[in-house]
Image (cartoon, rainbow, N blue to C red):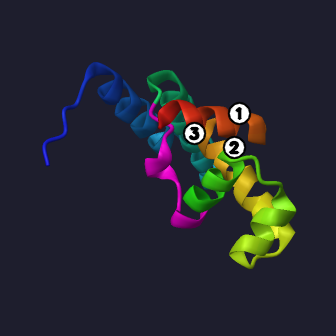
Amino acid sequence: MHTEINNQDILLLTLKDIILNFPLQNEIKVKLVKQLDREARAVSGNESYSNLTKREKNIVEFVKNGYPNKSIAQQLELAESTVKCHIHNICKKWNVTNRTQIANKALKDN
């Protein structure tokens, strides 16, 4: 598979390299790199299904179709708190703040 590297990718890699080699606590470095990745995905529009786990993808489909957490939990045989945790993780990965935005993004990307 051929992957094209553009100027934005080079800038992102350079910034990550600077952060990782800067004299900071590792915990801070990890947070900075994760935030940089989130911001880059938001700018490039690449926060798609590819960065979700299989379970998160399943939950997105339920959210997209209007199911509440309790119904999703019953369908997938999970605790409702587990569903909430997955939705929280999806929000972070997609740089959105709520389930409505998850549904809108899922509908737009399909």
**Residue extent of the magenta highlight:** 46-55
Give the amino acid at mark 2.
Cys
Asked if marks 1 and 2 touch (Cβ < 8 Å), the reply is yes
State the residue at coordinates (68%, 55%).
Answer: 62
Give the amino acid at mark 3.
Ala
Nearer to the camera, 57 or 26: 57
Marks 1 and 2, how far apart in space? 8 Å
Q: Report the residue that reaches farthest toward the bottom.
A: 77
Q: Position of residue 93 (x, y in %)?
A: 60, 45
Mark with earlier residue (1, 3): 1
Disc ID at residue 106:
3
State the residue at coordinates (67%, 39%).
Answer: 103
Q: Residues within 10 Å of mark 3 (few under 14, many from 20)?
A: some
Q: Residues within 10 Å of mark 2 (few under 14, many from 20)?
A: some
Q: Report the residue that reaches farthest toward the left.
A: 2
Nearer to the camera, 78 or 94: 78
Question: Is 34 on the left or on the right of 91, as rendered?
Answer: left
Give the amino acid at mark 1.
Gln
Q: Quadrant of residue 64?
A: top right
